[in-house]
Image (tube, coloured by chain):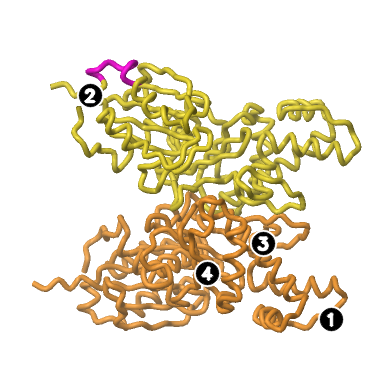
Chain colours: A yellow, B orange
Amino acid sequence: MENRQNKLIGIDVGGTFIKFALMDTEGAIEKDWMIPTDIAEKGKHIPKDICTSIRASVDQNELAELLGIGIGVPGPISPDGNTVVRAVNLDWEQVPLKEIIEAELAIGVRLLNDANAAALGEMWKGAAQGKADLLFVTLGTGVGGGIVLKGEVLNGCHSAGGEIGHIPVRSEENRLCGCGGRNCLETFASANGLVMSMREKLKKAGEPWHEMTSKDVFEAVAKNDPYAQAVLEDFMDILGQALAGIMNTIDVEEVIIGGGLSEAGDALLDPLKEKMDAYVFPQIRNHFSVKKALLGNKAGIYGAAYAYLTSHNNTYAGTVK
Amino acid sequence: MENRQNKLIGIDVGGTFIKFALMDTEGAIEKDWMIPTDIAEKGKHIPKDICTSIRASVDQNELAELLGIGIGVPGPISPDGNTVVRAVNLDWEQVPLKEIIEAELAIGVRLLNDANAAALGEMWKGAAQGKADLLFVTLGTGVGGGIVLKGEVLNGCHSAGGEIGHIPVRSEENRLCGCGGRNCLETFASANGLVMSMREKLKKAGEPWHEMTSKDVFEAVAKNDPYAQAVLEDFMDILGQALAGIMNTIDVEEVIIGGGLSEAGDALLDPLKEKMDAYVFPQIRNHFSVKKALLGNKAGIYGAAYAYLTSHNNTYAGTVK
């Protein structure tokens, strides 16, 4: 009899959309789609919406033969893998998502944090193919991270593995972070942090400030604006130093940079690599790569599916079908 | 027939002494001894000295039944586990120690870095018993580290996993580190760093400087010396912040502090924990322990033996006997 159990679903739950992909075990996507995220009533409809959308989009026979489902969510997962501890963007607290979906669809589920999913996605199908040890960094509104060691995500004892955006930076500034901390890496090394640094720089110089984006800062650098150049130099110094410190700790072979700021391409990656090489332990220097993420917002669905596929604990305990 | 294969040897190769222990698989030491380290002629006699000492100290029948040998060395081990890449204190470069000892004694060998060995030792028989995820920090002349995740040492892709002493610290100072870097964590947070900070502080204040040790600094703090207090506060701030950043990265449940400075006990651990809690990601705050290492200079022999015992690759390929 033909073994038809070679398909699975990867899901990326975001604050605005929930993305789905039905793919085979090689990562070939047969179908992908998305639905809006309904965060009303503390996001209580989201689990049902996920199940309804899967039933509507996947043939019933195919569903019955499905290997499993991997789901990336924007928040920490309990160390046992069963519960979304918190997801601010979904207004979730302690949601036992694995159990809910498994009970509804009778299909095994693996949950993981979305940054960790993106890290795995880039390893499986993106910029880090063939590698097993990597640091994935998103430089967007904030700074996120996912660490993969020997092919497995480092989730941590309190689901805070790879929370590199909140590494404290020694600085005389006093930037309040969303986490409640001061001078977290993301208050400097995110798109918002870059813009804030530009504003501070102009203010100190007595220059006028007009609302600008991180892209504007990069454009000003390209036009040799000395303020923007100094701001970007500081940005690189802080980020490069922090990433070098992480390298000295986990010693991976590949750093993948994603998020909106990575669109700056080599204007970001080249000076960042240079800074990291200057700060990293000699044994590592020149022996690692810094690359731009390749999968964009598809990294999460790939990684979620891959996480299910490679989980050591991916058998659904109940009766499948 | 009685299974007598329940003994193994743990070895800790230091720059001054090589320590040995014959123990059973429960870690009960039957015999321990040490020999001086002969670093003459680029340390070429060390492997033979190790074998000779084992033959002289362990009964021949017992030796033939030995499970294996774990060896901690003061330098990085190649990712394949076969070679000591470098050991400055032994004047070693690229020594294939595993092969040499296995060929000589016909017993399986596992090599690991001494800080990693100490981390495993504290987990097996010391302050971190029952834990599987921990950060071991030595605060001595320098700052060393060993990371254990899910019971396994994080050696890293370039054998630099846990090299936390070389995490760069943002500072206006310009302290040269032994690694060639500037302002590495160990230039501030080691015994030497503490003394250097005290000297700088007194110099800036125009006070006379008399040679003192890190212990003297702690004693001055106990006597409410305001300079020593300010210096210790800075020391704790830098170290606590760096360790918090590491926690946000690897998210372990236990931090074990060893090395000479740990002798200060609660005068070190209490303010350090406080600083770490102030700087660490909220999810981790108050959910981890900072403890003093328990095994002193025996951590390495325990950890080396344990590493052999738990290695997934601990079978000697040749013929035993």
Separation of marks 1 and 2 at Cα, in angstroms: 80 Å
Magenta residues span A54-62
Q: Nearer the viewer, residue A293 or A182?
A: A182
Q: Give the answer, above or below, for where A213 lies relative to B44.
A: above
Q: Which quarter of the picture shows residue A151?
A: top left
- Amino acid type of the residue that numbered disc 2 sits on in the rendered structure: Glu
Discs 2 and 4 share one subunit: no
Labelled disc at residue B226: none
Separation of marks 3 and 2 at Cα, in angstroms: 55 Å
Q: Report the residue that reaches farthest toward the left.
A: B1
Indicate the position of residue A62 as horizontal and vertical percent values. Answer: 25, 19
Separation of marks 3 and 1 at Cα, in angstroms: 25 Å
User: Pointer 2: what residue?
Assistant: A65
Indicate the position of residue B72 as horizontal and vertical percent values. Answer: 43, 68
Which chain does the residue under circle 3 lie in? B
Evaluate if marks 4 and 3 touch, with contact meaning CB atoms under 8 Å apart: no
User: Pointer 4: what residue?
Assistant: B257
Discs 1 and 2 share one subunit: no
Q: Is residue B317 left or right of residue B256?
A: left
Secondary structure found at label 3? helix
- Amino acid type of the residue that numbered disc 4 sits on in the rendered structure: Ile
Discs 3 and 1 share one subunit: yes
Separation of marks 1 and 4 at Cα, in angstroms: 32 Å
User: Pointer 3: what residue?
Assistant: B238
Q: Which quarter of the picture shows residue B267?
A: bottom right
- Mark 1 or 2, closer to the camera: 2
Q: Which quarter of the picture shows residue A60?
A: top left
- Amino acid type of the residue that numbered disc 1 sits on in the rendered structure: Pro
User: Pointer 1: what residue?
Assistant: B208
Indicate the position of residue A212 as horizontal and vertical percent values. Answer: 76, 27
